[in-house]
Image: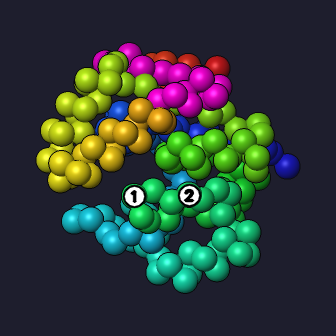
Amino acid sequence: MASGKLIVLTGPSGVGKGTLVRALLARHPDLYLSVSATTRSPRSGEVEGKDYYFLPRADFDKMIQQNELLEWAEYAGNYYGTPRAKVEAQINLGNTVLLEIEVIGAKAIKQTFPDALRIFILPPSFAELERRLRGRGTDSEAAMMRRLDRAKQELEASQEFDKTIVNDDLETALKHLELAIFS
């Protein structure tokens, strides 16, 4: 039976993971993007089963208890995790599976999938990361300070990953990402 591979992309909020993933999928539609589960409410425009599986807390807890998640973590008062069954099925079919997840979950993947390629996306600078986050205009000042404090902690973990890629220029970062995944 063919065996695929698992690619994990992580980094602090605002580093451009989502933009990189969208560009990567546009160029390589054969990649399988895993959809995470979360207990948070959908944001405007988000679609169930495409952006996330939006679950009540009790359902998420049940998935944890039944070992149905590859990883899970709490972030900003909500739970996020990767449903195990679909990822394993795609890998068993020989496909390359892409996970875009937060740092704690990405660190935990090493336990369940030691062969996963774990890639940490870095901002060009902390000042640029702050500019990007503030540019979203979605957080109160208190929430922004929590995000920035968390980002500092997450950036310290970058050396624990297999590869680091600086997202300064989208096209350059994308090329480095493709080299890491396909070579």
The residue drawn where x is 47% and y is 81% is 56
Q: Amino acid at mark 2?
A: Ala
Q: Measured from the top left, where is residue 162 in percent x and y?
A: 65, 25
Q: Quadrant of the C terminus?
A: top right
Q: 1 left or right of 132?
A: right
Q: Quadrant of residue 69?
A: bottom right
Mark 2 and mark 1 residues within 8 Å of each other at the beta carbon: no
Q: Judge whether 42 appears above or below 113 on screen.
A: below
Q: Nearer the viewer, residue 52 or 25?
A: 52
Label 2: which secondary element: strand
Q: Measured from the top left, where is residue 72 in percent x and y?
A: 59, 59
Which residue is identified by label 1? 76
The residue drawn where x is 32% and y is 38% is 148
Which residue is identified by label 2? 73
Q: Judge whether 61 appears above or below 37 on screen.
A: below
Range of residues picked out in magenta: 155-173
Residue 164 is inside the magenta segment: yes
The residue drawn where x is 49% and y is 65% is 79
Q: Nearer the viewer, residue 102 or 143?
A: 143
Label 1: which secondary element: loop
Q: Quadrant of residue 64?
A: bottom right
The answer to whether residue 7 shows anywhere in this view is yes
